[in-house]
Amino acid sequence: MSADINLSIRKKQEKGFITSSQVHKLRLVALIFLFGVAVLSAGLFLIIAASPLPQLREEEQRASETLKSQQSKFGKYLLLREQLSAIQVLLNTRPDLRKTIEVVFAIIPQGLQVSGIEISEKHISMGVSTASLDAISSFFQSIQDRAVQKVVPTSISTSSIGYSASTGEYSFTITFD
């Protein structure tokens, strides 16, 4: 019982106490783990440095810049396509002056001469002269028929018919709007 009372002597079997040999073993295991972590860290660093990751990042950045450039070009393309379709709608709604001119020249009767023609953005004006009132009547009748058929513009105006005694010709100006 006296051995149990002595508190200064420690027993090896006592729990919670670590002996110096165990401390040395733990220290050795910790140093091995530390060395292993250092070696693995250095190896991982070398693998990352030697890997193509920086090159892949540069390639990704170039691809991103190319996409941004293409996106801008594609946006400009879409804007241009939209503007062209709007222009096409406007061209389809405006009167075809070339067609009007072709129709008018096709219906000019014998003996009627075109002395001048003026084409502007919205209308065509023609100076006409003839020695025959029948040719003028025939011309007006043909124009009226084409206007009813909507082959020529329905808005047509004429100037007063003038007569020149020296040439014996009637002249007037007809305007298609």
Image (spheres, rainbow, N blue to C red):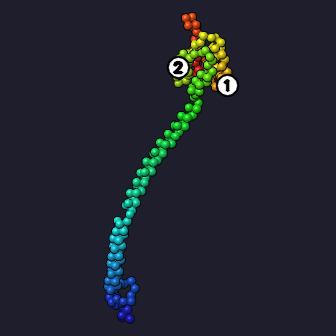
Residue 161 visible? The answer is no
Q: Amino acid at mark 1?
A: Gln
Q: For the C terminus, which image quadrant?
A: top right
Q: CA distance from mark 1 to mark 2?
A: 24 Å
Residue 69 visible? The answer is yes
Q: Amino acid at mark 2?
A: Glu
At horizontal 57% and vertical 26% (from top left) the residue drawn is 97
Q: Secondary structure at mark 1?
A: loop
At horizontal 67% and vertical 21% (from top left) the residue drawn is 145
Closer to the camera, 176 or 138? 138
At horizontal 55% and vertical 19% (from top left) the residue drawn is 125
Give the left or right position of residue 148, taking residue 97 as reference. Answer: right
Q: How many marks?
A: 2
**14 is higher (above) or lower (below) than 92:** below
Q: Quadrant of residue 99?
A: top right
- CA neighbours of label 2 inside 10 A, class few (<14), some (14 to 19), many (20+): few
User: Residue 57 at x, y = what percent?
Assistant: 39, 58
Q: Secondary structure at mark 2?
A: strand
Contact, CB < 8 Å: mark 1 with mark 2?
no
User: Residue 62 at x, y = what percent?
Assistant: 40, 54
Which residue reaches farthest bottom? 1
- CA neighbours of label 1 inside 10 A, class few (<14), some (14 to 19), many (20+): few
Q: Which residue was labeled with disc 2?
A: 118
User: Residue 78 at x, y = what percent?
Assistant: 51, 42
Give the left or right position of residue 171, taking residue 72 as reference. Answer: right
Q: Which residue was labeled with disc 1?
A: 149
Q: For the N terminus, which image quadrant?
A: bottom left
Closer to the camera, 104 or 35? 104
At horizontal 36% and vertical 90% (from top left) the residue drawn is 11
Closer to the camera, 109 or 42? 109
Mark with earlier residue (1, 2): 2
User: Residue 116 at x, y = what percent?
Assistant: 53, 17
